[in-house]
Image (cartoon, coloured by chain):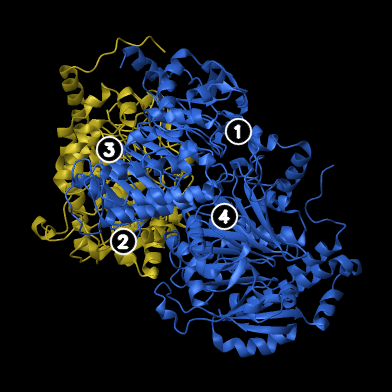
Amino acid sequence: MATPAEPQVATPTLIRKVTHYLHDGFHARCHGEYEAPPALGDARWTADLLMAGWYQSEHGRPPAHLEHRVGASGGGFDRLAFAFRGADDATLGDAGRPSSDRRVGDAKGSAPDDVLAQIDTTIPLNRRDDGRQIVLSAPWYGGGMSFGSVSENVMVSRARAAQAWGTLTCTGEGGYPPGLVPFKDNVITQVATGLFGVREETIQHAPVVEFKYAQGAKPGLGGHLLGDKSTTAVANIRESVPWVSLFSPFPFHSVYSVEDHKKHIDWIRTVNPTALISVKVSTPADVDMVAVGSYYAGAHIIHLDGSYGGTGAAPEIAKKNIAMPIEFAVPKVHRHLEAEGIRDQVTLIASGGVRTAYDIAKAIALGADGCVIGTAELVALGCTRCSNCERGRGCTYGLTTTDPELQAWVQPDWGAMRLLKLYKSLQWQLRDILHQLGMGSVRELRGRRDVLRYVAANGGDR
Amino acid sequence: MTPEVDRDPTDPFIADVTAQRHALPVAPRDRESAAEGGCGVVGLASTVPIAGRHLITPLAQMRNRGNGKGGGIAAVGLDAAAMGVSADVLAEDYLMAVAYVDPAVRDEVERTWLHAAYCVDHTWEVPRLEDWHVLPGIEVAPPEVVVYFVRPRADHLAAFWAQFTPQSGLGPHAKRVEDEYVQQTNHRFNVDYYAGPGGTRAFVMCQGKDLLVLKMVGYAEDVIRYYRLDDFTAHVWIGHHRYPTKGRVWHPGGAHPFVGLNEALVHNGDFANYQAMCDYLAQRGLKPLFQTDTEVAAQVYDLHRRTYGYPLEYVIESLAPTTERDFTQLPPDKQAAYAAIQATHIHGSPDGPWFFIIAESLREAWCLIGITDTSMLRPQVFALQEGPTHQIAFAGSEKQVIDAVLDELAAADDRFWRRADRYWAARGGSHTDGGAFVFEVTRDADGAKHLRCTDKFGRAVTLADVGIGGDGSVDVVDAVRTTDDVATTNGATNGATNGHANGATNGQSNGRAETTASPSPGILPRPLVAAWTEAAATAYLDALAASARPADPAARAAAFAALDALFDGPYDPGALRASRLIAQLDSVLESVVAAIAVAPCEGYRVWAGPGDDAPPAPATTLIVDATGLEIEGPTSLARVLVEAVQAGWRRLIVVGCTGHRFIGAGMGPESDGVRIDVYGASGDYLASGIDGATIVVHGWAQDQLAQIMKRGTLVVHGDVGQAFMYGAKGGRAFVRGDAAGRPLINAVGRPRVVINGTCLDYLAESFMAGDPLRDGGFVVLNGLRSDGRGGWTELATPYGGGNLFSLASGGAIYVRDPHRRVTEDQLNGGAFVSFTPEDWAVIAPLLDMNAAHFALTIDRLLRVDGQLRAPEHVYRKIAPGKVKALQAEEAWVAHAGH
């Protein structure tokens, strides 16, 4: 490696210059001003989906000229389509169309905006009748991304957007940077296996405390942050040793059974009696049993994290090979909760590869109440899915970094605005879907597997 | 020679039995029904028969470990008369309890099956309450249970016998064949009437001799209530609350205990390899019927113990294999035997967190056995109390449940007192104790009963370690002590920063004057105790209780100081039994609190229950009686304490704990100035998250203490349980005794901890607490044990586990190891580094505080075989190993100086 350049934190001029070119690039790419780079995207997050994310984050509407509904993974949500009334389902098959054939601009809805605006997208999080109620304005909230995995600027961008939109975001497992405190009513405190940064005050701040038992991208592993990213600032918040890789254990060393789990929840509720309790688990074969056990232990939210999610930092061996796909796990758990007679006492949240409004709607139709999104938010902020997330200075877009220079590329004002536009677009699309299904509320969609159809590889039904 | 540990080819019985079992019917298996959660378990073995009623309150206190979907008990060493049989019948007949889930089938069962297969010598209708609805914990009608005392019918037995190759049906095998007849006959019945397509109508709950199992959908104490076992006595009991997590309809057949033939097994935990274990059993012809992992554990145990005839040590090894460094510490012959066991039976070894309690009825003894998994992932406590005319031993999930049983017994029977002489935990799969303890009640020819406690290797566990002779009398041989005398230890308390009135700790050493009946309050009894007779002690304690009756703050402060000195020790109890003295102190404390409740004073008042919003007065101590407060939840003790602190109280005393959890949690940031003294059987998660407060536990503590502790002080005058200070960020903690598994795991920041005993294993794994010389954290591990005589003895090694400071990236361990017993192979990522004067400068102040709490002076710590040594010759430092070279980006940032 060449001798490192004399380091310096970005000057205001440099920040202006770099962010100008970055923003200009996001705009130009998604408006077709330049051809999409040949290496952009992957089968799950296609170039169209990435660029559609950038477009929505500018316009608050999906683009007509980009396939913004599905990817090309050949599985998962990409094999499911809505059986809309009468109309030919247009969910699939556009991705291959040459972009030159498309007219740049906003997608059109199935009804005028004022009609769509009548459709209810809110969901309650507490169905147990025990105190605090939280109603989300739309059926999603932000997933846990720790300080260390992303920068404080990214966290504050998300928190601002959550506050403005009426939803939540999550600390992940890296503590509570001071910049989040003003947004604490919209910030979930995650209690994960390393207990990094978890203190009584962060539990007491939180409207929702999320126990992260496992993560769909790497079930059987705890969180990890390689030494590259554990900068002095990150280590200070976690109270660890700088530049040392941090591996959270798996599982909780205090929880080896469901009665321990109940005790764990009772502890948190002693510290904060009004917080809602979310239990985030991956999707093992007995995920239905885990969900029921969590409910009886006192959870308000069961959060199933499937295997498609995770950033580029998750180990390859884990992220592609373990856990049940989320579209299998959700109906399995939904039906099991129904059979137990407790479906309406608990909120079921799906995550792990939920990219688009269509993915959200499909997860709900499969039986979830709502979704957690993570990567989609990073895409809104410019992520290209280059999978360099684990390196301290690997993210040239300033997202998955805590490098003092790189993180300056994302300013919270800009970031929050992008995310709000994304949320607006997702909500508009969700309403459009509901309208086409003849539904007045997203709550009607839950568990309506009948409105979905499986699309075989040849495009036909199966 | 490698021992043959699977089927002995020379033993035709095993081959015959296995072949027959392969022909037994199978129940349709629902793979998904193997779901099992955690549980609460307790067991006892006693030379004195114990009535069922004494388990009711203790089990009720442990309800939070179950969910009412399964409860059960097992009893061994039964009262023949209560069941209307002679002692001979009880000893010779199989005690077969048939549970009629559908009582309508009873006639049919008796007619077509029972009398066909067995000679029934006696039938005992297990009594029950008329209406199960009076017990609110029961949601499903419990089965009617009928106990039949039976012998196999001779003609059937002969026919069964005929299936064996001739030599296996002879002499020594006669009983084995008969046992097998019962096992197979009842298996067929259970398939027909319970597990098969005919539905769940009836099943055999137990089938051994002198062993009774009762279980149902509900809590264990309701089993005792419903089947009216209040006055029913046994020498061995186990109780179990189940916490299954699946299904809306539960059956009593899914509740614990599960039986083989001579044993009943309960279990807390679950296995990851249930399917593999089923396959292992299937290869040996065994077919589970009840679809929970506990059943297969009972079957494996029965297979090894009864069918294969292994010694108990090998059975335990097959369940909890000795691994890693512990294996290498075994003698070569054991290594060979264990390697063979592991190679043959590893698939029958339950993989995952579990703790088994087994009640076993053998011709020669009634046994209680507790076994923990190799990694010690479930909570477990053992205890022993020995009096002149009784011995009783326990195994349980929590210390509080053991104390609760002793409370019950002490209230009903003068022979017992409220504290055990010794409490301890097993080190799973270890070469030291093997992770298992066995308590055998045996009978002399003259009917006298004896209780013998051994570890996995058959080594006796006695009270000698705690300074008590094995015959119940006090061991007065002073020469065995290698410790300083009491006067020295007492000197240390002069510097105590103990919150109570400190004048009291200036002890007077004139032993004679204070043996009178009227001590003036405030005199430290510690040095006097050795000279006390029982009468003198009682007189002193009566006077102590009386001294707190007037509403005089100074007298009460002095009374608390005296109580603390006696509770905390260490001191030489002389002719007294320490545990008995502590039990008396419990009563004195209760009467002091009662006196304060009646007559509050400026210095002390008792919280009067919900709605008591008395304003805090400066310098007034608020006493909170946990009796009647919930163990967890919105109306729990922990929340009352939070409210008291929010209202402005700063000095709190908690009494009457029976497993109350989360004490000290929820006070929020910056609780400096708050001090909570805790008496009784405190529960899990105590001191979790504290940030400035001081909490003193006057006795043993349970599991998960001081999770994420940030600042403040925790003092525990006893041992602490599992996962102590998991994820802690800072604070100081002082533990008089040992820590169980995984203390300080994932701790960061600057926690500074002294553990005066040892740890089971995994101390400070993934420790990330900076550099101790630059304000980081560390653990001092002293490897000493209070000898029960006021002094301290060195343990054989300060740390016996195979995993010390694994994967740690910061902080340090300072281990008192003058004989260099800790070795490199116990470290996994850590390294011994030189112990410098700077290190001593960092730990000495903490050891001074430690001395004030536990009267363990620095002089004593630095004394090795009587000689005062330099700190660097006594302590060793373990620091993180070198991290691999910085990567490119790190180098860049490091270079940049960020």
Tell me the tag on residue B795. 1
Left or right: where does residue A363 sit relative to residue A207?
right
4 vs 1, front mark: 1
Chain B is shown in which shade? blue
Please tell me in which quadrant of the rendered image residue A437 appears.
bottom left
Tell me the crowding category of disc 1: few under 14, some 14 to 19, or many 20 or more residues within 10 angstroms, Cα based: some
Name the kind of residue labelled 3 in the image.
Leu
- For numbered disc 4, what is the local secondary structure? strand
Please tell me in which quadrant of the rendered image residue A112 appears.
bottom left
Dots 1 and 3 on the same chain: no
For the residues marked 1 and 3, what is the alpha-carbon distance in whole angstroms? Answer: 56 Å
Name the kind of residue labelled 2 in the image.
Val
User: Residue visible at 48% across and 28% down?
Assistant: B780
Residue under circle 4?
Answer: B395
2 vs 1, front mark: 1
The foreground one among B788 and B299 is B788
> Label 3 is found on which chain of the structure?
A
The foreground one among A382 and A122 is A122
Name the kind of residue labelled 4 in the image.
Ala
For the residues marked 4 and 1, what is the alpha-carbon distance in whole angstroms? Answer: 23 Å
> Label 2 is found on which chain of the structure?
A
Chain A is shown in which shade? yellow
Residue under circle 3?
Answer: A378
